[in-house]
Amino acid sequence: MTYSTYPQTDLRTLSDTVERLSRQVSTTSSDVDELQEKHESLDGQVRLHDERLEGLDQATQEMREAHDGLREELADDVAEVEAAVKSLTATIGWLERRVRAEQKLTPVDIDHADKAVRDLAERALRGQQSASVLLSPHDRAVYERQVEALGRLRQRIRSSGEDALRHSATLATTARNSAEHRQAGVAFRTAHQGWSAARAQLTATTEAAEQAGEALQYDDERRAVHGPNVMTGEAARATLQSKLRDRLSTAIADAALLPSWFTIVLGHQPPATDTQRWLDTAVSLLMYRIIYAVKDPVVALGPPPGDDADRKAWYRSLTEDLRKTRY
């Protein structure tokens, strides 16, 4: 039997390789141990953060519950205050009526309408009724713009048509490969496109302008009939407004006792802030009662209006103004 023998150098090389691999294994094992330690440390930090997050979630929930509780308490407090204010208002009203009865005081008749005031109110109402059959300034402006739009469109058609003809003449009299010919070609196409676009709008614009013109003509005819009443009514309204403002200002300055229908919605005197709006609303309320002869001693605006569109609009506007200026 023959045995193979390795050369001495091969054995040393193999030994060196094994030793090197052993060192690498040892180093890798150390790295693994280090990574394992870091992993365990990170796990600990993650658990700590989770515990903190759970604490924060609990604290947030507690704060939310506390906030909801405060809101409910506040809502209850507000409701109690509102109820107390209503009760106090009713009590003050009752005391005021008792004082009036015992002292035999009578409120100033700020919506009293003598003959002069009644005449102003009637002229203002007739003017308002006459104005209601006329176009409003806004509607007239819309119709006028429609008529003007047709004139501008026709001018565009003329201008673009003239431009197209002028450029077509240049095309007919210049060489096809010349710069002037090329420029005229571009200009001709632009003018023709503008002409075509304007022409496409002509039918609809013409119809709208014709209808607008008819509406304006009809309105002009009605203005010839109702115009004097409108002007007289506007002047009467301005005079009545001035008189009522002076009457109310005097009553407030004299600390006069105001009627119940007034104090229920506007109080006994103007507020310290936003006084002008309060006064404007009060004067408008007086005018409404006088113009429509409202005599209700408690309800400021009286019963809701019927089919009178102007009165309904004024009623709604005053109702909103009174809500905003409620004392």
Image: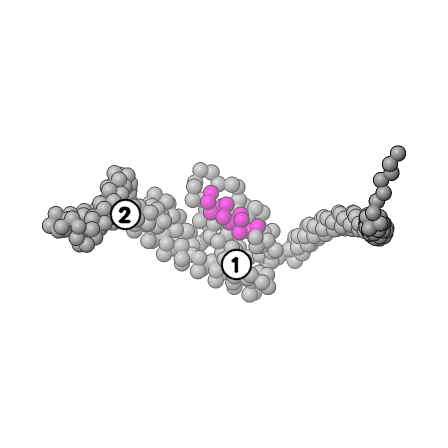
Q: Which residues are magenta?
A: 312-323
Image position, residue 36 (x, y; %): 84, 49
Residue 64: give its label: none
Q: Secondary structure at mark 1?
A: helix
At 58% from the left edge and 63% from the top edge, which residue is drawn? 273
Residue 313 lies in the magenta-colored region:
yes
- Residue 82 position, x and y percent, is 70, 50
Q: Report the quarter where the N terminus lies.
A: top right
Q: Amino acid at mark 1?
A: Arg
Q: Nearer the viewer, residue 66 or 194?
A: 194
Which residue is farthest bottom? 253
The residue identified by callout 1 is 277
Residue 291 image point, x, y percent: 44, 49
Q: Is residue 290 left or right of residue 194?
A: right
SS label for mark 2: helix
- Residue indicated by mark 2: 149
Residue 202, given in percent of the width and then of the height, sits at 25, 41
Q: Residue at x 47, y 43 (%)?
A: 312
